[in-house]
Image: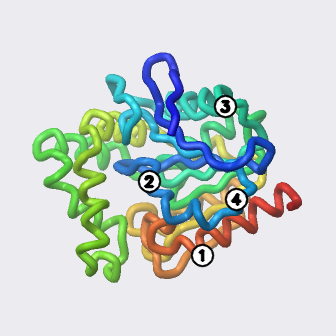
């Protein structure tokens, strides 16, 4: 665990693996922190340099005053990469993390070798949807909405195991409300539909076959725009790295090895 001063906030970062290994950088989803990758990371080659971080307003990173923009969140990712001296990165973005990855690839192509878009799209939801959610959260709070959020994240089979579900409910409920809302504002404004066709790096698009938040149809449409290799992960919802870590890791490892010829 380490921290990095990004100017307006301090970010929490986890770095594993040798400096000269293929670099993979992970960006988490709305309402989660870097622990969302805990089951996936041990399945990756130990020779890789694996970087995870808590985006602003989440986990143990600071929570600057919002609202946020996807451009700002991508600038944070770039600042972390620059601060750690990372290059030739495979950036793996989950949900809002995938929007961060798309924006990063557009504005800092010098940093990335390839991109993994997981359960994400060029545009997620509508401004009205996000404004309605913001209003409901301001009225009721995250704890009151946590069960509804988890229903959109996880398959029925996973939801039927209360002991597995409890930590994720706690993670959502304990996310700083202002950080969550600030990222909702970023999602309300973000629409990269007419820009990502310009991307020329290798892209892998993954989605849980039972994802209700960013559906396979939505992810497939984004994959078509940016000519990404598309895969559905069976037995998983919005967080394949949690419900199907073995298959998710297998697809990422194969993709990274193809790009780095290792």
The residue lying furthest to the top in this view is 7
Q: Nearer the viewer, mark 1 or mark 3?
A: 3
Residue situated in front as seen by the camera: 219 or 114:
114
Q: Is residue 138 visible?
A: yes
State the separation of the CA atoms marked 4 and 2.
Answer: 18 Å
Q: Secondary structure at mark 4?
A: loop
- Residue carrying label 4: 46
Contact flag, marks 4 and 2 (Cβ < 8 Å): no
Q: Secondary structure at mark 2?
A: helix
Q: Secondary structure at mark 1?
A: helix
State the separation of the CA atoms marked 1 and 3.
Answer: 29 Å
- Residue carrying label 3: 84
151 vs 106: above or below: below
Q: Earlier in the sequence, mark 4 or mark 1?
A: 4
Quadrant position of the C terminus in the picture: bottom right
Contact flag, marks 3 and 4 (Cβ < 8 Å): no
Q: Nearer the viewer, mark 1 or mark 2?
A: 2
Residue situated in front as seen by the camera: 2 or 197:
2
**Quarter of the rendering containing residue 154:** bottom left
Q: Is residue 244 left or right of residue 180?
A: right
- Residue carrying label 1: 247
The residue lying furthest to the right in this view is 261
The percent position of residue 203, horizontal first and vertical second, equals 71, 56
Q: Is residue 44 left or right of residue 61?
A: right
Q: How many marks?
A: 4
Q: Residue at x 50, y 57 (%)?
A: 37
Q: Secondary structure at mark 3?
A: helix
Q: Is residue 88 left or right of residue 240?
A: right
Q: Nearer the viewer, mark 4 or mark 2?
A: 4
State the separation of the CA atoms marked 3 and 4.
Answer: 19 Å
Q: Residue at x 48, y 53 (%)?
A: 95
Q: Earlier in the sequence, mark 3 or mark 2?
A: 2
């Amino acid at each position: 665990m380490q921290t990095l001063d990004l100017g307006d906030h301090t970010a929490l970062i986890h770095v594993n693996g040798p400096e000269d290994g293929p670099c993979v950088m992970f960006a988490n989803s709305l309402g989660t922190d870097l622990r969302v990758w805990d089951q996936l990371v041990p399945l990756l080659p130990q020779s890789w340099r694996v970087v995870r971080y808590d985006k602003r307003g989440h986990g143990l990173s600071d929570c600057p005053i919002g609202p946020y923009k996807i451009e700002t969140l991508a600038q944070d990712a770039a600042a972390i990469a620059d601060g750690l001296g990372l290059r030739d990165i495979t950036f793996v973005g989950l949900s809002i993390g995938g929007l961060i990855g798309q924006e990063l690839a557009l504005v800092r192509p010098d940093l990335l070798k390839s991109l993994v878009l997981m359960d994400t799209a060029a545009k997620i939801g509508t401004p009205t949807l996000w404004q309605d959610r913001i209003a409901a959260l301001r009225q009721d709070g995250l704890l009151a909405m946590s069960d509804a959020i988890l229903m959109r994240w996880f398959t029925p089979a996973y939801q039927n195991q209360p002991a597995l579900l409890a930590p994720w409910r706690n993670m959502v409920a304990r996310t700083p409300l202002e950080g969550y809302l600030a990222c909702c504002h970023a999602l309300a404004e973000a629409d990269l539909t007419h820009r990502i066709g310009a991307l020329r790096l290798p892209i892998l698009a993954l989605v849980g076959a039972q994802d209700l938040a960013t559906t396979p149809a939505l992810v497939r449409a984004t994959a078509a725009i940016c000519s990404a290799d598309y895969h559905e992960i069976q037995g998983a919802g919005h967080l394949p790295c949690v419900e199907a870590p073995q298959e998710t890791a297998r697809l990422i490892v194969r993709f990274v090895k193809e790009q780095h010829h290792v």
